[in-house]
Amino acid sequence: MNRDGVRIRHIADTDWDAVAALEVRAYAELGLSEGKSALRSRADASPETCFVLDVGSRPAGYVLALPYPPFSYPDLRRAEESAAPARRSGNLHLHDLVVAERLRGRGLGQRLLDHLTLTAGARGFERISLIAVGHSEGFWSARGFTAHPGIAPGGYGANAVYMSRVDETS
């Protein structure tokens, strides 16, 4: 744990209720909540690139990322089967990054992204992709992600934008 009481660690079995609750609060209003089993399937596809952010002794955020071919993304209507073949693509898809609403604006999302970026580079991923939802494109653009207007991410809402950036650490 850091001096400020913040720690990033791999997701444990006992974290899933908290992760699912954070996900519902972040995405239900947008109609994008997936449920615990779908979230868990994404983490099971790549446990080494999925993390919980603890503030004090409680989960206060999480990030789920898994290998996916460039310009492809998880189907929100179904659980993940396996992402192992996509590992060769060199693309890590950042599926979810959530920080509890009461803690936003404190740089915790950036800490999760920095941790994920270092992990991606150490694991040989060359690119990180994501789908910006809920008008979050500006947030991601400010962190080096570029929109790909030719990709229309179906199932992620009317304003969803597929974005990616080259991993600076690989």
Image: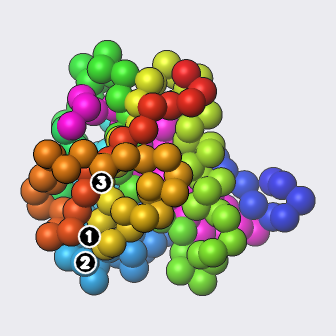
Residue name at image x 56 percent, y 30 percent:
168
The reply, left or right, for residue 38 in relation to residue 167 is: left
Q: Position of residue 165 (x, y in %)?
A: 42, 38
Q: Main secondary structure of the magenta part?
A: strand
In percent of width and height, residue 152 lies at: 12, 52
User: Splitting the image into 4 quarters, where does residue 126 fall?
Assistant: top left
The tag earlier along the polypeptide, 3 or 1, is: 1
Answer above or below: position of 22 versus 110: below
Q: CA distance from mark 2 to mark 1?
A: 8 Å
Q: CA distance from mark 3 to mark 2?
A: 14 Å
Residue at screen point 12% across, 61% down: 155
Q: Amino acid at mark 3?
A: Ile
Give the label on residue 33, or none: 1
For label 3, the SS is strand
The residue labelled by disc 3 is 131
The quarter of the picture where the C terminus appears is top right
Number of labels in the image equals 3
Q: Residue beneath label 2, please?
A: 30
Q: Nearer the viewer, residue 128 or 151?
A: 151
Which label number is shown at residue 157? Answer: none
Mark 1, Cα crowd under 10 Å, few <14 / some 14-19 / many 20+, is some
> Does 49 appear in magenta?
yes
- Residue 76 in percent (x, y) is at 18, 57
Residue interval drawn in magenta: 48-71
